[in-house]
Image (tube, helix red, strand yellow):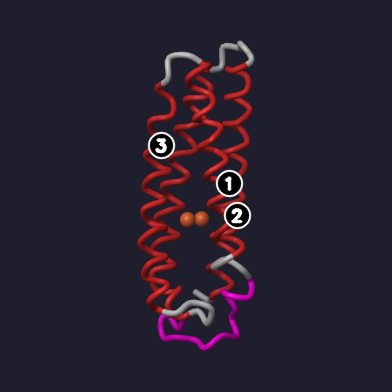
Amino acid sequence: MTPSEIRKELLDQHAGLRTKIEATRVAAERWSGGQQAREELRSCLATLADGVRAHNRREEELLRDLIPSADAWGPARAEVMQETHVQEHKDLYEALIDAGAAPDATSGVPPVLKLLDQMAEHMKREESSFLGADVLRDDAVTPDFFGG
Ligand SMILES: [Fe+2]
Ligand SMILES: [Fe+2]
């Protein structure tokens, strides 16, 4: 895959996740507004968790080989970034799995909204760092693994 193909795939997945995040936010706000939306919220959280898991796996797989080669990333920095990035994926996914367990909206909704903000923030940071068009360029020095 070329860097621009990788970038496109990951950005498309981000767009899909943003749609799921918004659906989850709507359900959380309905529940918080006194509507019977707990099951709807749980189902949104489950769908979101599936999407997040698939995206995280793919992103980790594609970035593992890619980032050390991109101009903007020294290998040492990439290593640290990879480790903290994978840990953040794990934390966000685990929080998503637990998020639907609260018994009432008063205790359940604020942590869900906070988590959705954290996920949106995670993607925004990625898009302004390693998913930038200036980092994933097809005209950068092309290592072997782009050849296949
Ligand atoms: Fe990520
Ligand atoms: Fe991502």
Judging depth in this view, the residue of 87 and 8 nearest the camera is: 87
The disc, 2 or 3, on the residue closer to the chain's N-terminal end is 3
Is residue 107 a member of the stretch shown in magenta? no
Judging depth in this view, the residue of 4 and 92 nearest the camera is: 92
Marks 2/1 in contact by CB < 8 Å: the verdict is yes
Q: Secondary structure at mark 2?
A: helix
User: Which residue position is annotated with label 2?
Assistant: 124
> What distance separates the C-alpha of mark 1 from that of mark 3?
14 Å
User: Which residue position is annotated with label 3?
Assistant: 95
Bounds of the magenta span? 133-148
User: Which labelled disc corresponds to residue 17?
Assistant: none
Measured from the top left, where is residue 15 in percent x and y? 62, 50
Within the image, what quadrant is residue 62 found in? Answer: bottom left
* Residue found at x 52% / y 16%: 106
Given the image, on which type of amino acid does mark 1 rest? Answer: Ala
* Residue found at x 59% / y 58%: 11
Given the image, on which type of amino acid does mark 3 rest? Answer: Ala
* Dot 3 crowding, Cα within 10 Å, few <14, some 14–19, many 20+: some
